[in-house]
Image: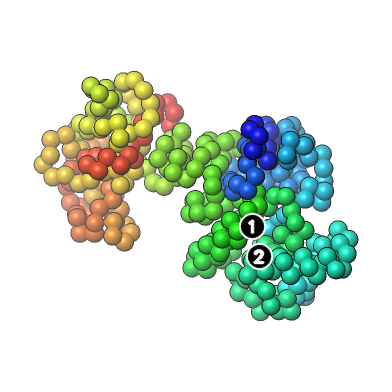
């Protein structure tokens, strides 16, 4: 823990019967940092947020704010603001009354309520809509009302539980940008739960990827994508195809990878991250790290089985010898379904090849 550490989750553990929902989770945030809790359904991210908020009590572990243990405090006394997945707005109240609700619940003076409601609505760019009915707002505006209500009591920490999940894709992208701007402008320490990678990467200063209640990796979006710590991270973050290989270490760090059914790929240190040593391994190759090569020595031979249009660079599914599948990012028209092709690492040296011990899969 450094002098700048503001919020700490210290070995938090929570069981529900035989299910270990959160398993000794350790995380720390600096003041003003935004941390995204990312993971598939059942990974424990929502339970972790509820433990942090005080809606659940841990079986063991602590929550500390500025080195003070708040684990035993109820949610109302932690001074955390919460935006729920479905916003939990009151349709019979107008915007101003919704924002004021939490302040009234804690007995704030009327004069303070008026001031704080006005300030909170200004923070989320909704000034002038105090008397607007909730049903008259767009989905993005409703999300900002929920955010204003969470900010009005002047919380120390902001908690966001899948805040954009009920918006359509176009509105979600625009609202995500607006939410990022508001959080950055306010500078509030924030923990966000999401299952959307784009959301985690755009909003989070760092991302904590969870799996089955445990922390798989913590880092910046670039670190998780470029240097995944486990095979799960390599496949969950972005796209990566697993292929068994035999590793042969060459001079000056150059690798030679023998692929099943033929193919000998040579990788420079800039193209590969992963395990040390030689012998059997599993290569996780990202689509942009591969290219088509016809009649080139060392190319792995295969047949194109699928094509997914993805703009300037489409994704071609290739079945290699012995049935192993990879994806290759290439311009549309580079090849066609049913065509035989050779596959090699990209010449660009931009990374995207990750080696792990075969038993780690």
What residue is shown with label 1?
A: 186
The image quarter containing residue 178 is bottom right
Q: What residue appears at the point 20 percent right and 33 percent down from the top-left corner? A: 263
Q: Along the line of sight, which residue is nearer the eye, 264 or 108?
A: 108
Residue 34's label in the rendered image is none
The answer to the question of whether label 2 and label 1 lie on touching residues, with beta carbons closer than 8 A, is yes
Provide residue 65's location: percent of width, then percent of height.
73, 40
Q: Residues within 10 Å of mark 2 (few under 14, many from 20)?
A: some
Distance of label 2 from label 1 (alpha carbons)? 8 Å
Q: Is residue 132 above or below residue 117?
A: below
Q: Indicate left or right for 74 with 122 as reference.
A: right
Residue 178 lies, with reference to residue 268, above or below; the image says below
Tell me which numbered mark, 2 or 1, is placed earlier along the sequence: 2
The answer, for residue 57, to whether it is visible in the render is yes
What is the number of callouts on the image? 2
Question: Residue at the location (25% across, 43% down)?
Answer: 348
The answer to whether residue 219 is above or below residue 335 is: above
Q: Residues within 10 Å of mark 1 (few under 14, many from 20)?
A: few
Q: Which mark is residue 123?
A: 2
* Residue for point 54% across, 47% down: 205
């Amino acid at each position: 823990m450094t002098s700048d550490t503001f919020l700490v989750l210290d070995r938090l553990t929570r069981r529900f019967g035989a299910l270990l929902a959160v398993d000794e989770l350790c995380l720390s945030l600096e003041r003003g940092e935004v941390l995204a809790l990312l993971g598939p359904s059942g990974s424990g991210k929502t339970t972790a947020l509820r433990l942090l908020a005080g809606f659940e009590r841990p079986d063991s572990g602590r929550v500390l704010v500025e080195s003070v243990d708040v684990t035993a405090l109820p949610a109302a006394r932690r001074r955390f603001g919460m935006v729920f997945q479905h916003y939990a707005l009151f349709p019979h109240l107008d915007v101003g009354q919704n924002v004021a609700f939490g302040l009234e619940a804690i007995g704030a003076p009327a004069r303070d309520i008026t001031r704080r409601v006005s300030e909170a609505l200004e923070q989320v760019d909704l000034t002038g809509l105090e008397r607007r009915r909730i049903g008259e707002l767009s989905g993005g505006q409703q999300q900002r009302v929920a955010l204003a209500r969470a900010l009005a009591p002047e919380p120390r920490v902001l908690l966001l539980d899948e805040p954009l999940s009920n918006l359509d894709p176009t509105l979600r992208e625009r609202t995500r940008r607006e939410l990022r701007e508001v959080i950055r402008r306010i500078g509030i320490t924030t923990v966000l739960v999401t299952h959307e990678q784009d959301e985690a990467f755009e909003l989070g200063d760092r991302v904590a990827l969870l799996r089955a209640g445990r922390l798989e990796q913590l880092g910046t979006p670039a670190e998780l994508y470029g240097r995944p710590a486990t095979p799960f991270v390599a496949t969950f973050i972005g796209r990566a195809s697993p292929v068994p290989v035999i590793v042969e270490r060459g001079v000056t760090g150059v690798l030679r990878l023998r692929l099943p059914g033929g193919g000998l790929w040579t990788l420079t240190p800039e193209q590969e991250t992963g395990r040390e040593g030689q012998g059997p391994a599993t290569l996780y190759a990202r689509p942009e790290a591969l290219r088509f090569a016809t009649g080139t020595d060392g190319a792995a031979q295969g047949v194109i089985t699928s094509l997914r249009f993805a703009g300037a660079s489409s994704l071609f599914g290739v079945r290699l010898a012995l049935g192993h599948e990879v994806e290759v990012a290439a311009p549309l028209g580079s090849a066609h379904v049913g065509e035989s092709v050779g596959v090699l690492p990209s010449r660009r040296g931009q990374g995207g090849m990750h080696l792990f011990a075969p038993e780690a899969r």
